[in-house]
Amino acid sequence: MITEQYLYAALDISALLFGAFGLALLYIARDIERWPKDLCIAILISTIACAVVDLLGYGVAQTGMSHASVLALSLAESLIAPIPSLLVFAYFVCCSGRDFRKNAVVRAECVLTGTLVVAGCLAKLNGEVCVVAGQEPHFGLWIALTFASIIALTAINLVTLVRYRKDITIVQGIMFLVCFLAEPSTQVILVELLLSIDLVRRYLDQKEEVAQQRARVAVLQMQPHFIHNTLASIYYLIAKDSEKAQRTTLEFFRYPQNNFEALAKEGTAPFEKELEHTRAYLAVEQACYEGRVFVEFDTPVTSFNVPPLTLQPIVENAVKHGMDPDSEPLQVFVATRDLGHGVQIIVEDNGPGFTPPDEKEWHFALTNVRERLKAQCGGTLEIGTREAGGARVTIFVPTQAS
């Protein structure tokens, strides 16, 4: 008997530790939706309260306090103990994508839980449950109603789990099944474990969703940026060579349709499409700076995907920041390399290179591309200096993304 009490005490102490961990996790994961988070907090607080009441009960039993004190703690346990199970069921309904506040099954569970609380308290007051050592319990109406409520709640839990099984993950289904069948002291630990796993999953899913939203906003920012620069180039070309301006306009006219179709798609785009966009852009710039811009492509690896508008903004930066009327013509080099564990994209130029004073001018496009690479394919972007002078931008796209 003493060994069993120590075991239950150890479980309650573990519940306290898991509860503290869960509350700390909730504090860190602030981006979690309101209702799942509020339910998690309620479950954690109620299970901690149950563990505290149980531990106080063990302490009272060891110190030999009055019958009234033992009965008061026993009644407190009857009042609190069913609440975590009800909240876990509400959390299960919430995880299935339903509004637990309007769910008829949750309302039925609330009625049965209330019945269980009342019947459990009356059974102890009526002497139908052993509260203190030496007491002789007897079978009566309230203890029968208590057992009936527990059986009904368990049946509803299992039936609802079968009905909603397609709306939750396999891991969630297994954990909820074990929670519904476990005894209260063990259920506390399982509830904490379930919450920890599910909170981490929700937190990561929402972080990924936020990253994807930022990536889409970044793409929308890039569209007017590119169009503005290209139209400005054509504007200056009109005064210089109207016929060439017409040809350049036709080159540019073919670009937006394919470009915007790619941007309308969520996720990544084939690198071949990025090359096509970049060549269309360079056709405009080479027409505007005839004899001043030369481009070399060495791209044997093209069968991989990148976020839309990844290559063109980098090449545009190379042209805009590398052009110097008083120096030799600008040479831009674009290459791809298969590294085995991923693909490397290299963009180099022989311009003045990247220096700290240029940071604000470079910031928009390259930061934009870097964030989208990280969010959409786990890629990286590094800025450096070319050995022979000039700027060098290196992109790495992991194999799983490419």
Image (cartoon, rainbow, N blue to C red):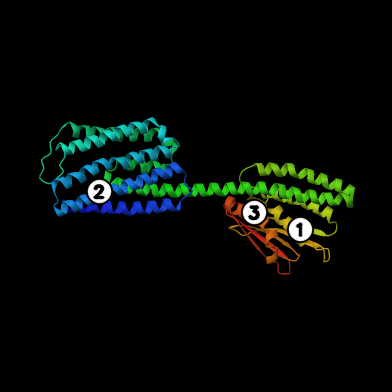
Q: Are the residues flagged by discs 3 and 2 in contact, CB closer than 8 Å?
A: no
Q: How many marks?
A: 3
Residue that mark 2 sits on: 53
Query: Residue shown at 66%/63% (left/top)?
Result: 383
Q: Is residue 66 among what the camera can see? A: yes
Judging depth in this view, the residue of 34 and 245 nearest the camera is 34
Query: Residue shown at 86%/45% (left/top)?
Result: 246
Query: Residue shown at 34%/52% (left/top)?
Result: 18
Give the mark nearer the N terminus: 1 vs 3: 1
Element on which disc 3 rests: helix
Q: CA distance from mark 3 to mark 2?
A: 54 Å
Percent across and percent down for residue 98 are 44, 35
Element on which disc 1 rests: helix
The disc label shown at residue 362, or none: none
Q: Are the residues flagged by discs 1 and 3 in contact, CB closer than 8 Å?
A: no
Residue that mark 3 sits on: 368
Amino acid found under the numbered disc labelled 1: Lys
Residue that mark 1 sits on: 320
Give the mark nearer the N terminus: 3 vs 2: 2
Q: CA distance from mark 1 to mark 3?
A: 17 Å
Percent across and percent down for residue 58 are 20, 51
Mark 1 Cα-neighbour bin, 10 Å: few <14, some 14–19, many ≥20: few
Q: Between label 3 and label 2, give the one nearer the viewer.
A: 2
Q: Is residue 150 left or right of residue 26?
A: left
Amino acid found under the numbered disc labelled 3: Asn
Amino acid found under the numbered disc labelled 2: Val
Percent across and percent down for residue 70 are 17, 47
Q: CA distance from mark 2 to mark 1?
A: 71 Å
Judging depth in this view, the residue of 39 and 2 nearest the camera is 39
Percent across and percent down for residue 263 are 67, 44
Give the mark nearer the N terminus: 2 vs 1: 2
